[in-house]
Image: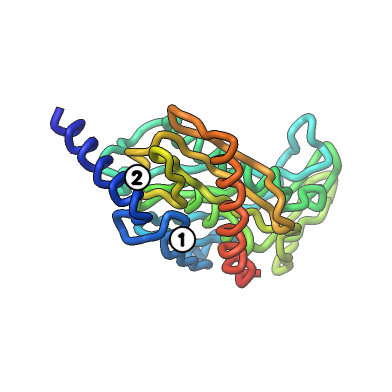
Amino acid sequence: MESVIIDQLKRDKILDLLKQGKRLDGRALDEQRPLSIETGVIPKANGSARVKLGNTEVITGVKVQPDKPFPDLGDKGILICTAEILPLADPHVEPGPPTEEVIELARVVDRGIRETEMIDLHQLVLIENKSVVGIFIDSSVIDSDGNLFDACSYASVSAVLSSTIPKYEIKDEAPVLVEGVTSKPPVKTLPVSVTMARIGDYIIVDPTKDEEACMDARITITTNSAGNICALQKGGEDGFSVDQLLKCSELALSVGTKIRKKLEQLM
């Protein structure tokens, strides 16, 4: 009962501030928290990045290795994103199998990269239908303060941009590593996700953990470098009106443009 009262009081405070165009941390409604990106944080990985979005912090590593293609995608390399929230990141997280929220987190990041076609997977084929190069992107949340979708997405994209692809030669129909020869990943576009929450009649960008606890609905929109919306994920128990969705789309484009400029510096 006490937690319910506290949550209601917090929601009332947040709503009162939103009516004034303010938020608990002093940001404007359409303002994202400070974003910092550091690459090369895992020396043994093929690529890595640490992203801090406000107090949310994520470390992502990229592993590249030869693999068998998916049965119905023999002309493309493999791309797989996974995610985990470490118990030290949040007092409510416990060790064990991934929860539905963690599975959704990984899928939203994966879909954003895949649907924008960030990586030309056709260039990762060694022998069609037999052998391809796989890119495996693993994100670990080490400090959770809301909006894990964007933090993990930015970390994943940054890790890919910092990564190197080993060269493999086919000998006796098997891939063999060519020592000392690498290349940059075949990047075609830069996906940027922007997550927004609706609290009452107000749309806010990059919600904190407190704001997520009070939100009625959530939406994550991922755009490519051409400004096209390529992926979308809706969450929360309520929905958005048509006008609210249009506003969210505009915010995804305007905020995404600023984030993309940061990512472009890593290329």
Q: Which mark is residue 51?
A: 1
Vertical order, 106 against 259 (above or below) = above
For the N terminus, the quadrant is: top left
**Amino acid residing under circle 2:** Glu
Report whether residue 162 is seen: no
Identify the residue at image location x=43%, y=44%. 202
Which residue in the rendered view is the most extreme toward the front?
A: 20
Q: Earlier in the sequence, mark 1 or mark 2?
A: 1
Marks 1 and 2: which is nearer the front? 2
Q: Which mark is residue 211?
A: 2
Identify the residue at image location x=30%, y=36%. 94
Identify the residue at image location x=83%, y=51%. 171
Side of 200 where 191 appears, left or right? right
Toward the viewer: 150 or 51?
150
**Amino acid residing under circle 1:** Val
Side of 23 where 68 appears, left or right? right
Report whether residue 158 is seen: yes
For the C terminus, the quadrant is: bottom right
Toward the viewer: 148 or 171?
148
Q: Position of residue 66 (x, y in %)?
A: 71, 47
